[in-house]
């Protein structure tokens, strides 16, 4: 609900939060706070707008000295005036400066939520789900309007923000920086939670307490990246998994981003998130608009767990789309780690037959199926099936796999071109590269220039041909390097700083067209593991490959971090061989499967090399997963013991629980990351059950009251007989 009173106090109320803004001297829009819900605002609380102003800044109203721009929590700050902090916007103006002076002009409130032109975003199905306010700020010198969009979700603790710039001048301007959100907190008593890592070590959770100065995460890689995920939470001192105030921010964008928290000399924290200003510049002609991508902001006064569940529900229900949005996802076998490039139809069918015996439902043919692709050094761009490996092409192999009783899926990496390819011979100008410089290769490949319409059309038409040439039910869309040598042969010098963003827009346009053309295909996003695990991609593809690291230990950390924001239905998890191909570690088949059952499930190993006992164990695992997959993919996740909990140092345990929305079922998983002999016991207090009910553990037949499970807890002691993992499946008793 959004209310604006006569004094122009804006109160944006969600289920349990309020986000308050007001107008102060000279129509500056300031941020009064974001906190647990209030229904009225007297103005007697709220942050100081003048504290020590005389020392440090000029004020626009000198006589009254009632506003210091350097102190006030400016809702959308500019640079060049007396606010000396990092600003939310910078535009190259006709007078050669970047100084904007933005004042409130007007606002509009309406039911529902508009889409953002050319960009993915959360959506409503019914206008009653959310209200939106657009606030226009105009510059005092130039006819430039900055519109702040806030969508307030009635039944969720979510506010979605983005920004628009309109150029009303009769000359071109250039946007150098435009943040999607900016929130000034009147305190610095927060830890910043971020998800950081590397290839095969994505999205491990890190906390750091804010200190004066800048703490930032960013991507300069052209993608959201393995290294930093476009997510930050500010966690109030004292907040935990189940208690306290948490502010979560997630950027619905798949390119360069920045998220920074700047603590000033008076303990104010300015939080900003948006497209990274590095190598960015957008020329805006007379009458044109530029839209920033969306930031999803989640408030919780019930700790990190509640924040995560709010993100999960929103993303499952109002970000993901298409036929598979709410469907149970198939169990897959992927041939990558089973064969790498060394396969033919016979080998694939042998693998498929074993997979069928094991209860697997879909076969994914990974990299290496097209001409000359004998290794990862060549042939990207030449999307013609290699009939030496696959006689009869995709039609035959997909039909044969279907005859085995599995659906058929295919890997593609359409944004790339290998220098050794026919495509590159014909269209060398289609790759991103700077004229007069030798482009750098990564995995011996270059990136196609998706800012070009002709390249976008070629990719769409080529994929359309490939996807129509067989019985293809699933597509894994890979992307295996970051963007460098960023320059487009199609654009003049002054537009080269638009290329990074135009690339992302080009990608989104292709994805929109191809997913609309093939609504029955289940698309899974992948980027050298999880380098594009972001909500922008989730808008088009309801699943994402979490990481190339499928080692149970590493995955427990990666998945726990990923699950802080992203729901299990998007998190693709596989069981692979031991010793693990990335870490060399040996873990039990049971531990690998219990870990992979935290998301959409599959296998990625050569089943033809396993003994009968292992195959039977896999059959039991797939049978079990089928019985719990709706619960896992669409239930509420509760973290019981997380890898980042301090008390797991003596014996690293990770434990999570999923409860069905109707609270009838709950799956509890415990994974020992490394075991100690005679290890201390643990108490696992379950969460989220129906307090008055009784639950039966379907494995042991034992009956417990929910209160016992949640208040007294289960006593867990490590034992080698568990093989590193333990599961409980509880069912509510009538
Ligand atoms: C990177 C992906 O993450 C892997 O799963 C696999 O598809 C390879 N690329 C294939 O080249």
Image (cartoon, rainbow, N blue to C red):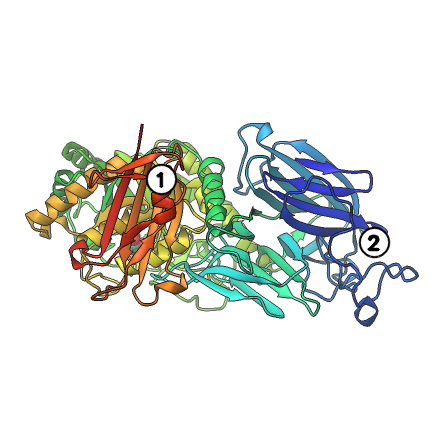
Residue 195 left/right relative to 402: right
Q: Between residues 648 and 185, which one lies in front from this camera angle?
A: 648
Label 1: how many Cα within 10 Å (few below 14, some 14–19, many 20+) = many
Q: Between residues 327 and 473, which one lies in front from this camera angle?
A: 327
Dot 2 lies on which element? loop
Residue drawn 34% across and 44% down?
A: 709
Query: Which mark, residue 706?
Result: 1
Counting every numbered tag in the picture gives 2
Residue marked by disc 2: 141
Dot 1 lies on which element? helix
| Ligand 1: quadrant of the figure | bottom left
Within the image, what quadrant is residue 50 found in?
bottom right
Tell me if I can see residue 530 in this picture.
Answer: no
Residue 463 left/right relative to 582: right
Q: Position of residue 471 (x, y in %)?
A: 26, 33
Residue drawn 6% across and 47% down?
A: 612
Tell me if I can see residue 322 in this picture.
Answer: yes
Label 2: how many Cα within 10 Å (few below 14, some 14–19, many 20+) = few
Residue 315 left/right relative to 421: right
Residue drawn 51% across and 62% down?
A: 220
Within the image, what quadrant is residue 567 found in?
top left
């Amino acid at each position: 609900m959004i209310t604006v009173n006569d004094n122009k106090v804006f109160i944006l109320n969600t289920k349990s939060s309020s986000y308050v803004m007001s107008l102060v001297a000279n129509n500056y829009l300031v941020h009064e706070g974001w906190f647990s819900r209030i229904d009225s605002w007297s103005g007697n609380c709220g942050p100081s707008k003048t504290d020590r102003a005389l020392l440090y800044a000029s004020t626009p109203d000198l006589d009254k000295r009632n506003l210091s721009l350097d102190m006030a929590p400016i809702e959308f700050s500019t640079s060049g005036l007396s606010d000396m902090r990092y600003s939310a916007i910078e535009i190259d103006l006709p007078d050669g400066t970047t100084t904007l002076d933005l004042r409130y002009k007007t606002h509009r409130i309406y039911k529902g939520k508009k889409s953002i032109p050319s960009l993915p975003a959360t959506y409503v199905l019914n206008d009653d789900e959310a209200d939106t306010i657009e606030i226009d700020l105009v510059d005092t010198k130039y006819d430039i309007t900055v519109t702040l969009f806030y969508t307030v979700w009635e039944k969720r603790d979510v506010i979605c923000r983005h920004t628009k710039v309109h150029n009303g001048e009769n000359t071109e301007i250039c946007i150098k920086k435009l943040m999607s959100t900016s929130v000034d907190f009147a305190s610095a008593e927060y830890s910043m939670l971020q998800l950081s890592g590397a290839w095969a070590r994505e999205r491990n959770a890190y906390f750091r307490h804010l200190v004066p100065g800048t703490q930032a995460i960013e991507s300069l890689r052209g993608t959201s990246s393995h290294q930093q995920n476009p997510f930050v939470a500010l966690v109030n001192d004292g907040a935990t998994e189940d208690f306290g105030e948490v502010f979560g921010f997630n950027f619905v964008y798949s390119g360069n981003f920045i998220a920074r928290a700047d603590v000033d000399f008076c303990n104010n924290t300015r939080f900003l998130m948006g497209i990274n200003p590095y190598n960015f510049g957008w020329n805006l002609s007379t009458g044109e608009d530029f839209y920033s991508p969306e930031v999803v902001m989640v408030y919780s006064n019930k700790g990190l767990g509640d924040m995560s569940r709010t993100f999960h529900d929103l993303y499952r229900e109002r970000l993901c789309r298409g036929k598979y949005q709410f469907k149970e996802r198939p169990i897959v076998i992927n041939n990558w780690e089973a064969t790498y490039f060394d396969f033919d139809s016979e080998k694939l069918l042998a693998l498929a037959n074993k997979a069928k015996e094991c209860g697997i439902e879909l076969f994914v043919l990974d990299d290496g199926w097209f001409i000359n692709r004998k290794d990862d050094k060549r042939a990207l761009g030449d999307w013609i099936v290699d009939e030496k490996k696959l006689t009869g092409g995709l039609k035959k192999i997909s039909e044969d796999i279907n005859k085995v009783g599995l659906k058929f899926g295919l890997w593609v990496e359409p944004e790339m071109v290998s220098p050794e390819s026919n495509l590159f011979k014909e269209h060398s100008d289609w790759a991103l590269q700077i004229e007069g410089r030798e482009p750098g290769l990564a995995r011996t490949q270059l990136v196609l220039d998706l800012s070009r319409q002709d390249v976008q059309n070629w990719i769409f038409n080529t994929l359309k041909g490939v996807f129509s040439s067989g019985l293809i039910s699933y597509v894994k869309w890979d992307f295996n390097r970051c963007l460098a040598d960023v320059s487009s042969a199609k654009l003049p010098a002054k537009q080269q700083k638009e290329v990074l963003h135009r690339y992302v827009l080009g990608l989104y346009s292709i994805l929109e067209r191809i997913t609309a053309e093939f609504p029955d295909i289940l698309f899974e996003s992948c980027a050298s593991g999880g380098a594009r695990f972001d909500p922008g991609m989730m808008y088009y593809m309801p699943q994402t490959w979490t990481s190339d690291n499928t080692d149970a230990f590493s995955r427990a950390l990666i998945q726990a971090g990923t699950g802080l924001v992203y729901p299990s239905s998007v998190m693709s998890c596989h069981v692979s061989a031991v010793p693990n191909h990335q870490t060399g570690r040996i873990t039990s088949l049971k531990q690998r499967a219990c870990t992979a059952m935290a998301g959409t499930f599959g296998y990625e190993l050569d089943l033809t090399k396993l003994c009968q006992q292992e195959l039977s164990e896999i059959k039991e695992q797939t049978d079990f997963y089928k019985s719990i997959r709706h619960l896992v993919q669409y239930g509420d996740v509760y973290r019981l013991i997380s890898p980042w909990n301090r008390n797991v140092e003596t014996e690293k345990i990770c434990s999570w629980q999923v409860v069905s929305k109707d609270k009838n079922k709950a799956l509890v998983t415990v994974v020992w990351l490394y075991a100690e002999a005679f290890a201390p016991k643990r108490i696992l207090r379950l969460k989220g059950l129906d307090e008055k009910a009784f639950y039966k553990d379907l494995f042991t037949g034992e009956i417990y009251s929910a209160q016992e499970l949640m208040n007294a807890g289960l006593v867990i002691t490590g034992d080698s007989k568990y093989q590193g993992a333990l599961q409980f499946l509880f069912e509510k008793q009538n």
